[in-house]
Image: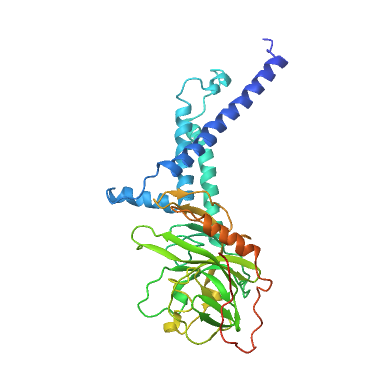
Amino acid sequence: MTPVSSSPSHVTGRSALRAVLRAERALWVAVIPALLAIVTVRFLIPLPSPALAPPLLALVQAGQSFPLVAGAGLFVLFSLLAQYWRAHLPGDLSLALAVPAARKAPSRFRQWLEIASVPAAVALAVGVALAARATLGEPYRVLTASMLPTLQPGVQVMGNKRAYKPGELPRRGDVIAFRSSAVALSHGTAAPPVMMKRVIGLPGDRIQMHGGTAFINGWAVPTCDAGEYGYLLPDGQGGAVRGRLLVEFLDERAYLTVQMPTNAFPGVYEVQPGEVFVLGDNRGTSLDSRSWNDGHGGGAPLTAIDARVDRFLVGVHLDGRADWSRILRPVTPDRPLLWVEGYDASSAEAGISKCLNEAPSVTRPPPPGGPLAPMTPSIQGGI
């Protein structure tokens, strides 16, 4: 029997058909599942409610708290379902490349192996990402209002676990995440396992406070009044935070703080070797270095620092919905941004711009060792 050869046009047609088939498979196993996962996480996960059954409530809370992990899991599920139903829908292009009947059909095991290949690869990628998280980056959820206006309760941020080499000091103005078990909290004081605060003092610095304004080695950290600030706290956290919005300038950085009447911090605290002095940006209600050691001051050990908090992941609206508008934005940008919802912040934003345009020329404190002058806060006019 004379063998039958395929014509060039026939081979070209089958090659083009294979390319279309690969594109169709990518659509079914990657693009469509990814879109479904994004839509589900973004719009279809309900708000936590006591009316939900306990198992469902736990799933909803997990989805709200860890949207990236939930999205990866949904992608794998949708990809498996799409591959299964793709073979049962009309118009499957793979039929056009069907082998002759005399060729042995693939076993059911091989079929399921092909179906599971893409989700398995995604699951492997998720596993690698989780392993990298433990050594490179860690997501944290803000649980309190102590870092307003920079970090709102419920916001998720990303910490850089490799920001500091062993023994390396943070920079003044860094926001760090550290273990609360390592600091000298007063007996009976409740604190989250991981606290997030801003570094103000380095080893050797002598810290004093005049209200919410820090003095470093007798030098007042420059601030500028940008106007009034208000933030409505989520249900269960009690009312609202109200105070004066101040731009603070330290080590060539500018960031926002909220100032309000607060208990005095007596005396002078000298930052010890191997620790840093930290403050919350919400100077009125922050459990920070001022209150440790029964109000005599204390530092956060360098060995207790988990990460430098660098970027936002997922914000939160007042109604509890996820806010993706800040994803991967820096926590301490070159120009501080005011994130508010529910009221007109145009006046405060104008005040911030005015303060930045009138930024002081000196933002670094003097070295330790000099005399401590009487404390007079350096507050610029603002609006």
Residue sitting at x 55%, y 23%: 94
Could you say which is closer to the camera, residue 376 or residue 231? 376
Asked if residue 93 shows in the view, the reply is yes
Could you say which is closer to the camera, residue 302 or residue 338? 338
Asked if residue 337 shows in the view, the reply is no
Give how far across and how far down residue 349 sits, in percent.
Answer: 55, 57
Q: Answer above or below: position of 319 versus 77.
A: below
Protein image colouring: rainbow
Which image quadrant for residue 30?
Answer: top right
Q: Answer above or below: position of 256 versus 222.
A: above
Q: Answer above or below: position of 286 versus 29.
A: below
Locate the N terminus by quadrant: top right
Farthest top residue in view: 1
Q: Answer above or below: position of 207 versus 170.
A: below
Give how far across and how far down residue 329 sits, in percent.
Answer: 58, 54
Give how far across and how far down residue 372 sits, in percent.
Answer: 60, 88
Could you say which is closer to the camera, residue 17 or residue 35? 35
The reply, left or right, for residue 325 in relation to residue 190 is right
Give how far across and how far down residue 37 sits, in percent.
Answer: 47, 40
Locate the C terminus by quadrant: bottom right
The reply, left or right, for residue 284 in relation to residue 275 is left
Which image quadrant for residue 18?
Answer: top right
Farthest bottom residue in view: 371
Residue sitting at x 47%, y 32%: 82
